[in-house]
């Protein structure tokens, strides 16, 4: 294998599994250490720069970081209470947001306007991110949204018991407070018209605002008691709806379905059940959202395919379902087939349909040069977020269909960079490199400026509000968040994967001290070979192909040092037992580029 | 010294051996020796060998004297019996222990100071008596604890860190052991675990006095240019005689060399040693030939490593003394005090 080029920031960035998995590349271990030190405002600002909405995301993020977390790969259930689980990264983020002091004086202020005007369609997370990044760079940004409070789906679709409104208000205000940002109370009815207004660039962050309906028999007749999930959630959020029937069926297996059933449970639904076509494991909802719903006494029925709404005397009385199972055909496609069992009937008073969301681009004319693909989605470059019209950019759910908030933020950052480069006359396909700050952690012979002792603590559970009180008030936040003690214990579980093991071959005397001490058998000195061969020959086989090998040559014996980055605990014992300093522990603080460097 | 304990988390593929232990179960606390010390590598090799040999830790007694090397038993086999003796007196304490209980596996750990200076007599006599043990000398050629004076095994002409040249001739413990009657004599290098681990396994399975002279560089005081015990010098002057593969009684013996180049040696406990010759004309069962070869190579500035000498036929101390098989602590009163009639019979036999 070729020797690893560690000057490429991607090698060590990839080692930080959580940061690599985060669409916005949040430097997770750094902020977790700051939380452990009680420096919540500092931790908050690291988050704020990367993901813009730490308080919101600390409650609602889909947390792609957690399945990636190394901790789950290295825990031994015999040592860690029978469980192998990732660090509760998301809920630690909330700790920083909840406990920070005033950060007002740390937030950026818009410089003198550069004369360029950018319009954002929608004021959701993608548009707000674009606005923040560009305002700091001197642009005047106007967000166009029928709800001038800003927040988009964050405000309308996420129930208050998961996300209090004050958190949204606070974090939207941090952005609008920068200056040069206006939210205009306006629904955009025509893209051609908007272009004609002469904006320098347009960003479309209009989301996927249309809930998919279910066109099966009885839909029309029972219509009065059949509601589209996201519309119903928005009505609850706006206070237009305050009650629902006693018996409620929620159709769908995603997070919207979970929000619907839990909301229904608080608005008079005593017999609420979720009915899903697929199996429990295949459901799109995050595992913890399913857990929370079940904990509130909501059963989830799987393998039930909706067949009809049953309406008697003009009134919805229930639904029938076909019982199905999954089958894989010869081509490897998975499809649902009837088991042949008799159809199931479930009585109900109301049905909430949460079977998916769709984009709504009726306001974009098809003759203005903006190309759509066969699925009627705009053609958008996934790296630059540019559409086929050079001055129009997309992001969030409007770009590639429904995803989640953290992706909208990532799209916003990318689009802001593109808009800035486009309006500066630069090639937008050239993307700016990330900022890398490398600091050796060595303070003395065996002293490091990070806590390298690996904790055997199990994942801490977030305390919840008592069930009776939670169900009695749709506005009462269920999760209470970690207190200081729980937060500290959870923070100790982080393995500091951003403190990298850096190897300097000319200093190495090949004494094997690092090989002998490594608790994970990560390090091997051996003859070089092809990657597949090397991976098998290491002291412990390196079978996780997603994780790179770190190869270094230039040793006196002609061998190479091979380190499997997969399961390293970053305990630093290799560096601690190294007599010559060939190994060093260096913190790689990597921040991906943003348009305005807020 | 290292302030944190080695994390107990381990590689997900860590396996258990036939007696239910992982390799990590054979470790001890983190070493307090200088970072990079060869002794730590030997400790790791002992851990690996005991794991591979399916040895239950409670069946091992590790004894040592005084010095850096004699500190190491703390850092491996944390669940075994241990004894730190007076300087140089490990062999006599070990002999006593072995006489009292022959069911344990005896591991003597010593250094060049402990064995070649203050304990040279003890070293010679335990070999001569044929105590069933594995005697590991961690040989770095200097007194590390007193900051790097030449030890009795330092080669003539080697240069100390401060520039002094050694004018005395060095004691070759391996040659001495062959002369004194050890039945298994090997030499290895702490920086070559592929050679060292099988030799330790073979030594443990050998039913008699087995000595392993392991060159172990002292990173703090003897790893410079001019030293003959530095990592670089030993790597450049390592004349390996053979390569050893060790198979436990349960394992199938697999050979990956061309036929005819290896010697198969079966130990009494069923362990099979497969010796692959690297030096064509070297016969490890020829005592005089072995001594001559080692001396000739040494004169040429080379360090012979590998299995130097093996006498499979020699009986150990217990065999020659015809001692009782059970540990003395387990003998009951009737066995220990056979009565007046038995005493009379012994007295009669001596008249």
Image (cartoon, helix red, strand yellow):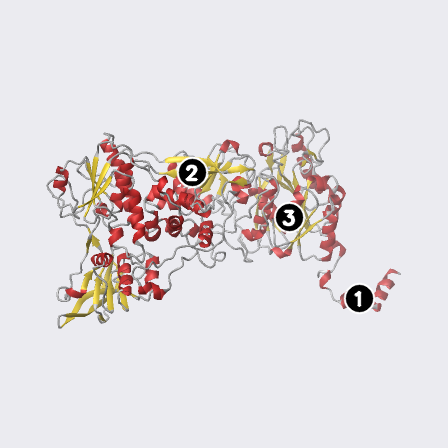
- Which residue carries the number 1 mark? B337
Disc 3 and disc 2: Cα gap in Å? Answer: 38 Å
Left or right of residue B6: residue A392: left
Q: Mark 3 lies on which chain?
A: B
Q: Residue A101 location, x and y as percent?
A: 40, 46
Q: Is mark 1 on a helix, strand or loop?
A: loop
Say if mark 1 contacts mark 2, CB within 8 Å.
no
Residue A268 picture quarter: bottom left
Image quadrant for the C terminus of chain A? top left
Q: Residue A82, relative to residue A565: is it above or below?
A: below
Q: Quadrant of residue B215?
A: top right
Residue lying at the far bottom of the rendered structure: A313
Instruction: Say yes or no: labels 1 and 3 on the same chain.
Output: yes
Using the image, tell me which numbered label, if any, was put on residue B73. Answer: 3
Q: Distance between the residues labelled 1 and 2?
A: 74 Å
Question: Could you tell me which chain the residue with mark 2 belongs to?
Answer: A
Give how far across and how far down residue A367 sits, in percent.
10, 41
**Residue A115 spot, x, y in % from top left:** 22, 32
- Towards the viewer: A81 or A543: A81
Question: What residue would you read off at disc 2?
Answer: A588
Q: Name which of mark 1 and mark 3 comes first in the sequence.
A: 3
In the image, B263: left or right of A153? right
Choose mark 1 or mark 3, whichever is in front. Answer: 3
Label 1 to label 3, Cα distance in Å? Answer: 37 Å
User: Which residue occupies the foreground of this view, A215 or A120?
Assistant: A120
Whether discs 3 and 2 lie on one chain: the answer is no
Camera-side residue of B323 and A23? A23
Query: What residue appears at the point 47 percent right and 34 percent down from the top-left corner?
Result: A553
Q: Which of marks 3 and 2 is in front?
A: 2
Task: Please state if B309 lies on the left or on the right of A223 as rendered.
Answer: right
């Amino acid at each position: 294998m070729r020797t690893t080029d560690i000057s490429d920031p991607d090698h060590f960035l990839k080692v930080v599994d959580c940061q690599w998995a985060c669409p916005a590349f949040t430097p997770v271990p750094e902020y977790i250490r700051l939380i452990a030190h009680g420096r919540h405002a500092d931790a908050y600002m690291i988050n704020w720069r990367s993901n813009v909405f730490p308080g919101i995301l600390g409650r609602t993020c889909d947390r792609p970081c957690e399945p990636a977390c190394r901790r789950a790969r290295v825990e031994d259930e015999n040592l860690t209470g029978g469980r192998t689980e990732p660090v509760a990264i998301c809920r630690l983020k909330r700790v920083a947001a909840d406990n920070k002091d005033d950060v007002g004086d740390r937030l950026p202020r818009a410089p003198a306007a550069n004369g360029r005007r950018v319009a954002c369609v929608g004021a959701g997370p993608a548009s707000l991110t674009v606005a923040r990044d560009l305002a700091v760079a001197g642009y005047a940004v106007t967000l166009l949204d029928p709800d001038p409070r800003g927040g988009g789906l964050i405000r309308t679709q996420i129930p208050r018991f998961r996300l209090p409104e004050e958190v949204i208000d606070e974090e939207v205000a941090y952005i609008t407070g920068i200056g040069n940002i206006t939210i205009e109370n306006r629904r955009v009815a025509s893209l051609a018209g908007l272009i004609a207004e002469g904006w320098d660039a347009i960003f479309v962050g209009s989301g996927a605002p249309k809930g998919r309906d279910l066109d099966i028999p009885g839909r029309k007749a029972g219509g009065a008691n059949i509601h589209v999930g996201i519309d119903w959630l928005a009505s609850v959020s706006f206070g237009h709806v305050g009650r629902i029937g006693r018996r409620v069926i929620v159709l769908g297996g995603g997070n919207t379905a979970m929000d619907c059933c839990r909301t229904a449970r608080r608005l008079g639904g005593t017999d609420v059940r979720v009915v899903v076509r697929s199996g429990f494991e295949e459901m799109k909802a995050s595992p913890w959202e399913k857990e929370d719903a079940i904990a509130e006494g909501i059963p989830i029925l799987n393998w039930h395919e909706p067949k009809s709404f049953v309406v008697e005397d003009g009134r919805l009385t229930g639904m029938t379902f076909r019982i199905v199972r999954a089958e894989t055909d010869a081509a490897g496609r998975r499809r649902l087939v009837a088991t042949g069992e008799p159809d199931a009937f479930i009585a109900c008073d109301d049905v909430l349909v949460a079977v998916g969301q769709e984009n709504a681009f009726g306001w974009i004319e098809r003759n203005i040069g903006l190309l759509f693909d066969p699925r009627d989605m705009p053609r958008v470059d996934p790296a630059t977020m540019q559409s086929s019209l050079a001055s129009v950019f997309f992001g969030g759910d409007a770009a590639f269909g429904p995803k989640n908030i953290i992706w909208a933020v990532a799209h916003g950052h990318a689009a802001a960079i593109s808009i800035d480069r486009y309006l500066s006359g630069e090639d937008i396909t050239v993307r700016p490199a990330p900022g890398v700050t490398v600091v050796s952690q060595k303070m003395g012979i065996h002293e490091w400026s990070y806590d390298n002792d690996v904790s055997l603590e199990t994942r801490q559970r977030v305390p919840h509000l008592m069930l009776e009180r939670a169900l009695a008030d749709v506005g009462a936040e269920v999760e209470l968040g970690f207190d200081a003690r729980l937060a500290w214990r959870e923070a100790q579980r982080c393995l500091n994967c951003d403190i990298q093991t850096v190897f300097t071959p000319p200093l190495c005397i090949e004494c094997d001290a690092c090989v002998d001490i490594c608790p994970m058998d990560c390090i091997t000195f051996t003859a070089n070979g092809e990657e597949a061969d090397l991976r098998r020959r290491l002291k412990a086989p390196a079978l996780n192909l997603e994780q790179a090998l770190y190869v270094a040559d230039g040793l006196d014996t002609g061998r190479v040092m091979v380190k499997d980055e997969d399961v390293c605990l970053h305990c630093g014992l290799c560096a601690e037992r190294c007599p010559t300093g060939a190994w060093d522990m260096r913190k790689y603080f990597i921040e991906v580029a943003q348009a305005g460097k807020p | 010294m290292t302030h944190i304990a080695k994390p107990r988390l381990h590689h997900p593929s860590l396996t258990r051996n036939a007696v239910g232990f992982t390799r990590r179960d054979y470790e001890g606390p983190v070493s307090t020796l200088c970072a990079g010390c060869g002794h730590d590598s030997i400790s790791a090799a002992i851990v690996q060998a005991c794991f591979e040999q399916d040895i239950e830790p409670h069946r091992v007694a590790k004894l040592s004297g005084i010095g850096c090397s004699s500190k190491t038993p703390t850092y491996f086999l944390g669940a075994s019996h241990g004894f730190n003796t007076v300087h140089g007196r490990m062999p006599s304490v070990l002999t006593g222990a072995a006489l009292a209980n022959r069911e344990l596996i005896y591991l003597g750990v010593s250094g060049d100071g402990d064995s070649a200076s203050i304990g040279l007599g003890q070293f010679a006599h335990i070999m001569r008596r044929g105590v069933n043990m594995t005697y590991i000398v961690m040989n770095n050629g200097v007194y590390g604890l007193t900051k790097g004076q030449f030890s009795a095994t330092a080669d003539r002409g080697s240069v100390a860190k401060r520039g002094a040249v050694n004018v005395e001739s060095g004691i070759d413990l391996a040659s001495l052991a062959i002369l004194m009657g050890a039945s298994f004599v090997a030499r290895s290098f702490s920086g070559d675990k592929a050679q060292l681990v099988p030799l330790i396994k073979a030594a443990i399975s050998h039913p008699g006095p087995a000595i392993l002279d392991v060159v172990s560089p002292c990173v703090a005081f003897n790893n410079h240019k001019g030293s003959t015990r530095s990592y670089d010098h030993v790597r450049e002057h390592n004349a390996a005689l053979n390569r050893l593969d060790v198979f436990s009684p349960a394992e199938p013996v697999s050979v990956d060399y061309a036929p005819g180049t290896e010697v198969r040696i079966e130990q009494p406990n069923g362990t099979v040693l497969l010796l692959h010759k690297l030096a064509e004309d070297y016969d490890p069962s020829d005592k005089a030939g072995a001594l001559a070869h080692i001396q000739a190579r040494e004169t040429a500035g080379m360090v012979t490593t590998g299995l130097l000498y093996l006498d499979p036929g020699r009986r150990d101390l217990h065999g020659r003394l015809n001692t009782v098989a059970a540990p003395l602590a387990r003998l009951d009163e009737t066995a220990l005090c056979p009565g007046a009639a038995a005493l009379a019979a012994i007295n009669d036999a001596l008249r």
